């Protein structure tokens, strides 16, 4: 991904002890694909209790947690933040919001406002991807629906304003294989849900197995490859 | 809600005929999915061309490791090319035992040659199943998500009554 023109980290910057944010932008990119890293003024992924930033460039977990049991966006952000795995975080957040259509980050009390914006960006990317594959959709209507609060609109606006600078197509956001195997498992599950949604019925276990079997000829199936395959097999 | 000993016993009952069968058609699917065939080969699927055994194990939304008593051979987040090679050593080996433990349906499939696949769920508040076993009677045993498990006709539409 090519977010370099847009991302900043925070080497040698002054930090306010009261707000734990940097007062000036950083100079290098700690994790280009992590929407949280797009907040050029945040310190240690907005979790100074859990992470430190000894180099000024990267948040480091001092608890070395191997995982978490919550499964929601707060858990995803914490877990992948601990590993500094920005691609994994972004992929997992997109996978999560695909599978939880009614999820609203603005009402998720486990998230800070910045984390809510991080999830909103993942929702925006998914929505943009959907719009890309369904051109009749008005992307701005989707955008309004995924940014449920004025605060998030303001915060995410900082980032969305930078999107034209990003050399990345919607396909790159969710097409192709996610950066870790488990995320791709969940992408398959999410694609099955999308197929069911488009068909207006649940798939049975034989049908789900058939979809998986039929993907063997594809080298690197992405979300929409899986959906297309499912609709070809059982679709309208 | 927690998993009870009775849950484990019922699942073990369903799995019991699998013990002593030879694994074949071991395959890495999407991501870290692993599928293993057991029993007689069924006719190939007319649409996909894939051939399954009477018993078809699908390790789904779980992490897993292939290991021996002494060492880990691969883990499910290793590079797929490494995984693909490693799991092939299960082909042709007999399944010696299946051990399921509480509180999270951790499952060890132990094969001849001391190879084990240790399956352990990572998410407990999600909708993604841990593993599935298609059986010769047309049913599928689905373990997970969370503390749930079920047996149902694999061809049953989800909105049909039982």
Image: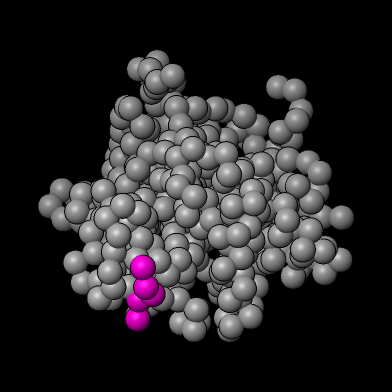
Q: Residue B12: within the magenta?
A: no
Q: Is residue B133 above or below residue A94?
A: above
In percent of width and height, residue A14 lies at: 28, 69
The quarter of the rendered structure image containing the C terminus of chain A is bottom right
Magenta span dominant secondary structure: loop
Which range is magenta?
A23-27
Determine the image quadrant of residue A220. bottom right
- Residue A41 rendering spot, x and y as whole percentages: 40, 66
- The answer to whether residue A96 is visible is yes
Nearer-the-camera pick, A105 or A161 = A161
Residue located 46% across and 82% down the image: A4
B130 up-or-down from A171: above or below: above
> In terms of image quadrants, where is residue A227?
bottom right
Q: Write the residue at 45% across / 40% down.
A: A110
Residue drawn where x is 54% and y is 27% of the image:
B150
Left or right of A9? Residue B149 is right
> Looking at the image, what colour scheme do you see?
one colour
């Amino acid at each position: 991904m090519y977010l370099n023109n847009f991302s900043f980290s925070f080497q040698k910057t002054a930090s306010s002890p009261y707000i734990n944010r940097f007062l000036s932008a950083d100079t290098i990119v700690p994790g280009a694909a992590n929407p949280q890293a797009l907040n050029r003024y945040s310190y240690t992924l907005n979790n100074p209790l859990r992470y430190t930033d000894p180099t000024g460039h990267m948040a480091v977990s001092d608890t070395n947690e191997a995982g978490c049991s919550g499964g929601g966006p707060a858990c995803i952000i914490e877990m992948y933040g601990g590993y500094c795995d920005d691609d994994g975080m972004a992929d997992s957040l997109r996978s999560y919001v695909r599978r939880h259509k009614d999820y609203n980050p603005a009402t998720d009390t486990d998230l800070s406002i910045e984390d809510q914006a991080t999830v909103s960006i993942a929702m925006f990317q998914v929505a943009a991807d959907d719009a890309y594959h369904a051109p009749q959709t008005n992307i701005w209507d989707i955008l309004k629906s995924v940014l449920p609060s004025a605060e998030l609109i303001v915060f995410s606006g900082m980032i969305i304003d930078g999107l034209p600078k990003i050399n990345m197509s919607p396909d790159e956001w969710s097409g192709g294989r996610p950066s870790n195997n488990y995320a791709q498992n969940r992408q398959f599950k999410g694609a099955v849900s999308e197929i069911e949604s488009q068909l207006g019925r649940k798939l049975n276990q034989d049908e789900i197995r058939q979809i998986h079997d039929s993907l063997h000829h594809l080298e690197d199936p992405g979300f929409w490859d899986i959906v297309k395959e499912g609709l070809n097999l059982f679709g309208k | 809600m927690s998993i009870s000993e009775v849950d484990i016993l019922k699942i073990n009952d369903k799995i019991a005929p699998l013990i002593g069968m030879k694994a074949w058609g071991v395959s890495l699917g999407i991501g870290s999915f692993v599928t293993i065939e057991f029993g007689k080969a069924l006719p190939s699927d007319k649409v996909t061309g894939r051939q399954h055994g009477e018993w078809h194990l699908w390790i789904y939304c779980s992490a897993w490791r292939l290991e021996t008593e002494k060492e880990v051979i691969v883990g499910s987040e290793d590079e797929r090319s490494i995984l693909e090679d490693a799991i092939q050593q299960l082909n042709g080996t007999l399944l010696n035992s299946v051990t399921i433990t509480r509180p999270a349906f951790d499952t060890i499939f132990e094969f001849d040659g001391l190879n084990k696949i240790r399956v352990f769920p990572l998410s407990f508040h999600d909708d993604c199943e841990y593993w599935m076993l298609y059986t010769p009677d047309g049913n599928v045993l689905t373990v997970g998500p969370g503390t749930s498990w079920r047996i149902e006709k694999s061809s049953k539409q989800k909105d049909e009554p039982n």
